[in-house]
Image (cartoon, rainbow, N blue to C red):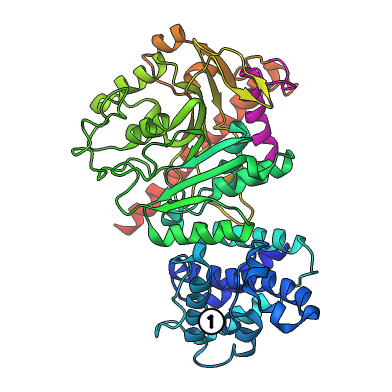
Amino acid sequence: MTIERTLFAAADKMRGSMDPGEYKHVALGLLFLRYIGTAFQRKYDELLPEGEDVAEDVDEYLAEGIFWVPEAARWSTLAANAKDKGIGVKVDNAMRAIEADNEQLKGALPKVFGREALDPAIVTGLIDLFSNIEFDGTPRDFDLIGRIYEYFISEFASSEGKRGGDFHTPKPVVELIVQMIEPARGRLYEPCHGSGSFMVQSENFLEAHKYRRADLAIYGQERNHTTYGLARMNLAIRGIVANLQWNAEGTLLRDAFPDEKFDYVMANPPFNISDWSGDILAEDRRWKFGTPPVGNANFAWMQHIYDKLGSTGIAGVVMANGSMSSMSSGEGDIRRAMVEAEAVDAMIALPGQLFYGTQIPACIWILAKDKSNGVAKDAKLRDRRGEVLFIDARKMGALVPGSRKQKELSRDEIARIAAAYHAWRGEPDAGAYADEPGFCKAASMEEIAKHNFVLTPGRYVGAGAAEEDGEPFEEKFDRLTAELRAQFAEGRRLEQEIQLRLDSLL
């Protein structure tokens, strides 16, 4: 079992009957303090030989991007007082002290530990648990705690079910969009950033492909203040600098970046939201393809995202499946206008059960501002006008170990989907693209028009080739016929037995 699983299992056991939505902030807040303390203590120990006054110089830490931690908030201080009955109040005060000395963390840290309803034993147990994380004094420590933090966020989202989907997108879905979009250089934007998972995965992409972190500027906004704080902690643990804005009115009603354009947009907006102020925004300039229905924000989100793209920008958007086929309230007309304007680059149908607490399947829309243009891996992409790529991934995915409800895509499946897209759009070293029955199809505008601009991939990719099992047809026919007859006979027998038992009760 990995250290992430071991720690979460132990932490979750301490939760007892506490709601996972509340407990999440307790566990993640203390885990963040552990990170802060680790980074600070390493630098402190490095400076101490030069004198205590040097080790206590705030500027020495800020110069290296390390958060300054006042003495009362240091992990060693909290650990030494972990068994005090007032430990919860001490942790709250530590959070406030850290925010006071670190401008970029103001308002981000939870102060929930001193509440009367929270058993101090839970706080004590978590401090003891996280104190046992072994660090080796190298930068790998921060990779480790980043992995632990990400795992905790994901597990809490799973525990919360449908509510967890409001703040965190499952990692395989995030990885798939990042692998398709390839955010290498420029400006990245999340219009509803949740826990910041797209931003974290984009940084992982940069590192894996040897791009410079400084070449990607990150922007995001979020309506839920608690989730906004969670994202700021998540990014801080990774050392990711981003321009995040808390937007209490919501992105659609008041965009925090009204004049900005971006090279990449990634989003998992809330599906089918009806209370999005559609009546107020009926005349909004963003509705280039048609006014979204007042009762459903899906195409408002999509048009907002398209509007935020720069001249060669590209976006990956998770959407409800109904967005591909709905004809109600003018949505079919909006979809048609988007396709005819060459706004849609690719459509991916996902398997069900990928998302927390729901089996409702979803899809991914890949939007492109200019399909005749674009750059990937420093090479110009081919002209894709007149085509849309359809990928049907509904048969992919497997149940997460230990779960009967949630599936995840494997690394190989993610790579296969991304590779088909990269080949189709003409990326260097991606190989030649070819339609694959049952999986992918590059459909022409004429074909899409024949389907009345319904964008469900299953309509285009067709059925895959049936697997050959080597059994001759005659033998298979006889075997299946015999099995069917036996099942009919068993059905008749059970029917008679049920009837006899009913008669005996009369």
Q: Amino acid at mark 1?
A: Ile
Residue at 72% from the left image edge and 83% from the top image edge: 52
Q: Can you say whether 263 is above or below 369 in the image?
A: below
Residue at 62% from the left image edge and 35% from the top image edge: 185
Q: Main secondary structure of the magenta part?
A: helix
Q: Residue beneath label 1, please?
A: 122
Residue at 41% from the left image edge and 17% from the top image edge: 339
x, y percent for residue 126: 59, 78
x, y percent for residue 293: 24, 32
Name, please, the residue furthest toward the bottom.
Answer: 84
Residue 145, located in which quarter of the rendered image? bottom right
Can residue 465 be spotted in the picture?
no
Q: Magenta region: which residues?
A: 411-432
Name the image quarter holding the N terminus: bottom right
Name the image quarter holding the C terminus: bottom left
Q: Is residue 416 magenta?
A: yes
Q: Mark 1 falls on what kind of element?
A: helix
Q: Is residue 219 magenta?
A: no
Whether residue 373 sits left or right of residue 50 in the image: it is left
Whether residue 379 sits left or right of residue 383 in the image: it is right
x, y percent for residue 301: 36, 36
